[in-house]
Image (spheres, grey):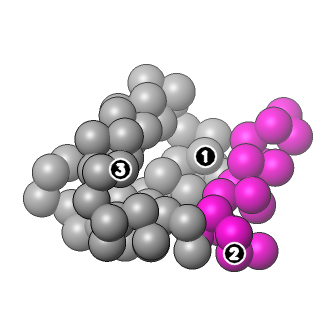
Amino acid sequence: MRTLKHDWLIQCYMDAVRLQLDPEFIDLLLEEIHRRSNDPAFRRMWMAASHSPWGMAAAGDAFHAN
């Protein structure tokens, strides 16, 4: 996971939640996201994705809908 580009990691997480993939896989993605959270460049991308109408909020809505 460490070799994934920041934007790919974020997209993988959003897709995994939206597609309701294995919770253990989602947890692995979240662990990597947490590990990268101290990187300012990653934090900016994460915040941009989380405030996008197609970002985390939409992925989260899909996750909690079922």
Sequence-wise, which precedes: disc 1 or disc 3?
Answer: 1
- Image coordinates of residue 3 in percent, x first then y, are 12, 59
Q: What crowding class fits label 3: few (fewer than 14 Cα within 10 Å), some (14-19), or many (20 or more)?
A: some
Location of mark 2 (residue): 52
Q: Quadrant of residue 52?
A: bottom right
**Which quadrant is home to the C terminus?**
top right
| Magenta: main secondary structure | helix
The amino acid pointed to by label 2 is: Ser
What secondary structure is marked by label 1? helix
Magenta residues (range)? 49-66
- Identify the residue at image location x=78%, y=49%: 62
Which residue in the structure is indicated by mark 1?
A: 17
For the residue marked with disc 1, what is the amino acid? Val
Q: Residues within 10 Å of mark 1 (few under 14, many from 20)?
A: many
- Dot placed on the residue nearer the N-terminal end, 1 or 2: 1
Spot occupied by residue 20 in the image (x, y as percentages of width and height): 63, 40
Labels 3 and 2 touching (C-beta < 8 A):
no
Whether residue 7 is visible, yes or no, is yes
- Give the amino acid type for the residue marked by disc 3 in the picture: Ser
